[in-house]
Image (cartoon, grey):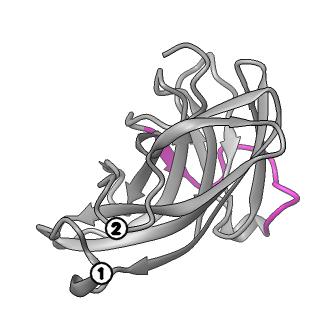
């Protein structure tokens, strides 16, 4: 899947204070994510912030906002735990941005990852290509196991490399 833009399931450690301050959010509210010793540390921004990501020759602006519980009557696929969703907007700036709902992985308070439940709510972010100047809006849902809570949503590339992080 060459040329695909961020977000695939992979474990990431999120902890406060691993990197310098982020000018997009107060330091006390920012977490950082590190995927390996060779990758740069990614500073989290608050839910609702827009991050510009360049990957495989394409640049797009991503916004992840409005983390909330999904009522049972709005679920297309019933949750085994509790269904949560975020609103995602992807606006292609240059090149052709390849997107996929599976690139958005949630991080639980206990450090585990929660894979997206693509197709569980409508309108959902599925997959596709966006030429420069186009945008797509939709939801990404997560079936959160009992006793867990979402603290961050991470955007990954198809290889699991971290591209951006949104946190509370």
**10 in relation to 69, above or below:** above
**10 in relation to 46, above or below:** above
Nearest the camera: 142 or 120?
120
Residue 159: x %, y % from top left: 47, 20
Task: Specify the segment rendered in magenta.
Answer: 12-25
**Main secondary structure along the magenta-highlighted residues:** loop
Q: Is residue 84 left or right of residue 1?
A: left
Task: Estimate how packed mark 2 is, as few (under 14), some (14 to 19) or many (20 or more) residues with alpha carbons within 10 Å.
Answer: many
**157 in relation to 44, above or below:** above
Q: Quadrant of residue 123?
A: bottom left
Lower position in the chain sequence, tag 2 or tag 1: 1
Q: Is residue 25 left or right of residue 73?
A: right
Q: Residue at x 27, y 72 (%)?
A: 83
Q: CA distance from mark 2 to mark 1?
A: 7 Å
Q: Residue at x 43, y 34 (%)?
A: 8
Q: Residue at x 33, y 52 (%)?
A: 118
């Amino acid at each position: 899947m060459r040329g695909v833009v961020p977000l695939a399931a992979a474990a990431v450690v999120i902890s406060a204070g691993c990197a310098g301050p982020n000018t997009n959010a107060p330091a006390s509210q920012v977490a950082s994510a590190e995927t390996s010793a060779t990758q740069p540390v990614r500073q989290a921004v608050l839910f609702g912030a827009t991050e510009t990501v360049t990957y495989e020759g394409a640049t797009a602006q991503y916004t992840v906002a409005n983390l909330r519980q999904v009522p049972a009557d709005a679920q297309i696929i019933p949750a085994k735990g509790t269904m949560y969703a975020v609103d995602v907007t992807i606006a292609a700036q240059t090149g052709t941005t390849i997107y996929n709902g599976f690139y958005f992985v949630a991080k639980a308070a206990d450090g585990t990852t929660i894979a997206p439940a693509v197709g569980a709510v409508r309108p959902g972010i599925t997959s596709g290509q966006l030429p420069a100047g186009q945008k797509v809006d939709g939801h990404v849902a997560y079936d959160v196991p009992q006793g867990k809570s979402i603290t961050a949503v991470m955007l990954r590339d198809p290889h699991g490399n971290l591209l951006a992080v949104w946190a509370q």
